Amino acid sequence: MSKAIDFYFEFSSPYGYFASKKIAALAEKHGCTLNWKPFLLGAAFKKEGTNSLISYPMKGPYSKHDIERSSGYYGIPFKWPEVFPIFTVNAARATLWAQQAMPEKAVPLIHAIYDKAFAEGVDIGQVPVVLEAAQSVGIDPDTLSENMRAPDVKARLKDETQAALDNGVFGSPFCIVEGEKFWGVDRLDMMDAWLTRGGW
Amino acid sequence: MSKAIDFYFEFSSPYGYFASKKIAALAEKHGCTLNWKPFLLGAAFKKEGTNSLISYPMKGPYSKHDIERSSGYYGIPFKWPEVFPIFTVNAARATLWAQQAMPEKAVPLIHAIYDKAFAEGVDIGQVPVVLEAAQSVGIDPDTLSENMRAPDVKARLKDETQAALDNGVFGSPFCIVEGEKFWGVDRLDMMDAWLTRGGW
């Protein structure tokens, strides 16, 4: 049976964006199924007593620079969004709805939203931007607009966020493979080695 | 003129220990001079409003496991010290004294102390353990014992710790090369690329 990689990501996370460009190839390399799991990182910050990276006096400026530098290192375009941190409830709900209603379009939608945010620097906190991203991958924006605020979609985002917390997810990106946790785009190499060697 | 890598490390930092095994080869590869800079990370935690990694509800258990896993990944032996976090004032003072009084023995002393802590799992918070490490690299323990508590050595540790803060050092290990900052043993690959390509 193939292993599953649970890939937890927050749409406001630049490192999550970088990882979103790399995770599919890694999963494919190891014949793993890949579960894309949007969640709201704020809940984890609250539980941990931590804050957005950029809010810290020294780690903040460092991280801003490291994110820009990571763009060059990974060869992935990057632009700061107009507003940061980003309000990502709409983006996450849109994704959760697509995953259920039209699963074949869900991953393209994730990439389209992330690209809006961090390749184009547009504020994906705005519903029209999320709808535009959806339209670009062939999702009808009116259908999405009607459905993304449905009670069951709202409930699902709460449940998914709670499940992430229950599974010990405290950052983005965050992968779990057979119970083994890897936090950060800078742990993908270690996850690669772990999957190759079957652990150690 | 050769570039200089300032390698900031806290003796209580397992990731600092791993990096201490790798940094010399990296410096040599790029013809960089290497400055070993012990400091007290607690001051940075205070300024940042952060805490020891292991103190966080989710990040704590994750980090403990990641540290053990990193040992296998890097192929560097690791054992948790009896007491953790470690009281490292004595280890840092001993190093600062050796750097001035017998510079050729300072780097061997750093490795000996780190090995006591994280390869043998002994509590380097205890002065006799620091003296034992010193003796193992040919430093007379009585001379060290007399000198490591001298006012100028105490003052130097305060100054070095303040200088680290002033330079934006908020974690361990932490490298600065020509103003470019790299935090974490997991940024050594990026620093390697940065030195190879001359930045980007």
Image (cartoon, coloured by chain):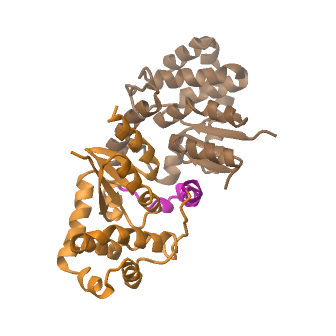
Chain colours: A brown, B orange
Nearer the observer, A41 or A105: A105
> Can see residue A56?
no
Q: Is the residue B43 above or below the residue A99 in the image?
A: below
Q: Note whether residue A132 is visible.
A: yes
Q: Where is residue A68, by image quadrant?
A: top left
* Residue nearest the viewer, comparing A67 with A159: A67
- The x, y position of residue B194, in whole percent, is 37, 39
Instruction: Spot the residue most to the right.
Output: A1
Q: Is residue A101 left or right of residue A81?
A: right
Magenta span covers which residues? Answer: B49-74
Image quadrant in which you'd find residue B11: bottom left
Residue drawn 32% across and 42% down? A61
Asked if the magenta segment contains residue B66, the reply would be: yes
Name, please, the residue furthest toward the left. Answer: B152
Q: Quadrant of the N terminus of chain A?
A: top right
- Residue A176: x and y, percent? 65, 45
